[in-house]
Image (cartoon, rainbow, N blue to C red):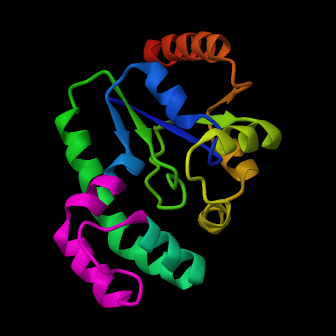
Amino acid sequence: MIRIAIVGEIGSGKTFATKLFGLPTFNADNEVNKIYKTNRVAYKKLRKKLPEFINSFPLKKNELSDAVNKSIENLKIITKIVHPLVRRKMNIFLNKNKKKRAVILDIPLYFENKINKNDDVVIFIEASKKKINKALKKRQKTNTNLLKKLGILQISKNVKKKRSDYVIKNDFKSENMIKKVRILKKEILRK
């Protein structure tokens, strides 16, 4: 099985590119949301560590955002509790899809959480800061302070780009992205 990891800055178009590949996909953000909605153990641990912010189950994003906005240490607490659960979900996904030709890993902190393996194919989605900001403004409820704090966890885009096997420049024109992904998918699956 070929593991294809999609990396890039927040708002660069990673999820859009991921969908275009049409391969089984592990989306870490979706898993985090499921954990917040369904995992009582995570809730109890977070409630114990952050009682002034976490008030009810299922976990509410605004409570978590308030905790992160208050202190970067709170972000580290949340990460320490949630990321092992996400990793477990990823391992289940990989096991379930081990006979597939290829899978996509859409994991924002792919390098930072040391999920990368030597034979993974890493694709960096590159976009201009101006276009990223424009895309983020279109998203509903984008909390720019929260995005800045989350950005602290990430290694620089230049390091990610350097560690990637391929770079796709996203100009936010669907037809261009579709063409680039189609060509790249063919090349990767030929290996």
For the N terminus, the image quarter is top left
In this view of the protein, which residue sits in the foreground, 117 or 21? Answer: 21
Q: Quadrant of residue 47?
A: bottom left
Q: Is residue 24 above or below residue 56?
A: above
Asked whether 43 falls inside the magenta stretch, the response is: yes
Q: Principal SS element in the magenta part? A: helix
Q: Is residue 83 above or below residue 130?
A: below
Residue drawn at (20%, 60%), measured in percent from left and top? 38
Residue drawn at (48%, 29%), measured in percent from left and top? 18
Q: Quadrant of residue 58?
A: bottom left
Q: Is residue 46 left or right of residue 75?
A: left
| Residue 83 horizontal/vertical position (percent) | 37, 65
Range of residues picked out in magenta? 32-61
Q: Is residue 98 above or below residue 73?
A: above
| Residue 25 horizontal/vertical position (percent) | 35, 33
Tell me if I can see residue 122 in this picture.
Answer: no
Q: Is residue 132 left or right of residue 18?
A: right
Asked whether 59 falls inside the magenta stretch, the response is: yes
Tell me if I can see residue 138 in this picture.
Answer: yes
| Residue 17 horizontal/vertical position (percent) | 54, 27
In this view of the protein, which residue sits in the foreground, 116 or 38? Answer: 38
Q: Is residue 44 left or right of residue 110?
A: left
Residue drawn at (60%, 53%), measured in percent from left and top? 142
Residue drawn at (46%, 38%), measured in percent from left and top? 120
In this view of the protein, which residue sits in the foreground, 124 or 14? Answer: 14
